[in-house]
Image (tube, helix red, strand yellow):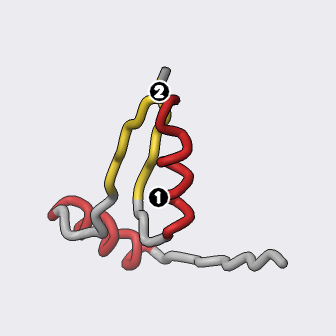
Amino acid sequence: MRTLIGVELDGDDLADVAETAARGDGPRQETTVLPFEEAAEAHRRLERGGFRGKLVLVP
């Protein structure tokens, strides 16, 4: 099953988002870089949930 959610922002909403981002008050996102050899660990982290951000595998 797939759920799609649409959001429409007006000019005031966009200004609030821009101000929040400029202050650095938005949600924190983590970037984790792992070598390909640790792909199984990357999958375990994602399956556990609670991960916000990017998980990158590199050669």
Above or below: residue 54 compared with residue 38: below
Residue furthest top as drawn:
59
- Name the foreground residue: 24 vs 39: 39
Sequence-first disc among 1 and 2: 1
Q: Residue at x 59, y 78 (%)?
A: 7
Residue type at numbered disc 2:
Val
Mark 1: which secondary structure?
Answer: helix
Above or below: residue 3 compared with residue 18: below
> Left or right: where does residue 43 sit relative to residue 3?
left
- Name the foreground residue: 20 vs 49: 49
Residue type at numbered disc 1:
Arg
How packed mark 1 is, by other alpha carbons closer than 10 Å (few <14, some 14-19, many 20 or more), is few
Q: Alpha-carbon distance for marks 1 and 2?
A: 16 Å
- Name the foreground residue: 6 vs 28: 28
Residue occupied by mark 1: 45
Quarter of the figure with residue 1: bottom right
Residue occupied by mark 2: 58
Mark 2: which secondary structure?
Answer: strand
**Residue 53 % position (x, y):** 41, 56
Front tag of 1 and 2: 1
**Residue 57 % position (x, y):** 49, 34
Above or below: residue 59 compared with residue 33: above
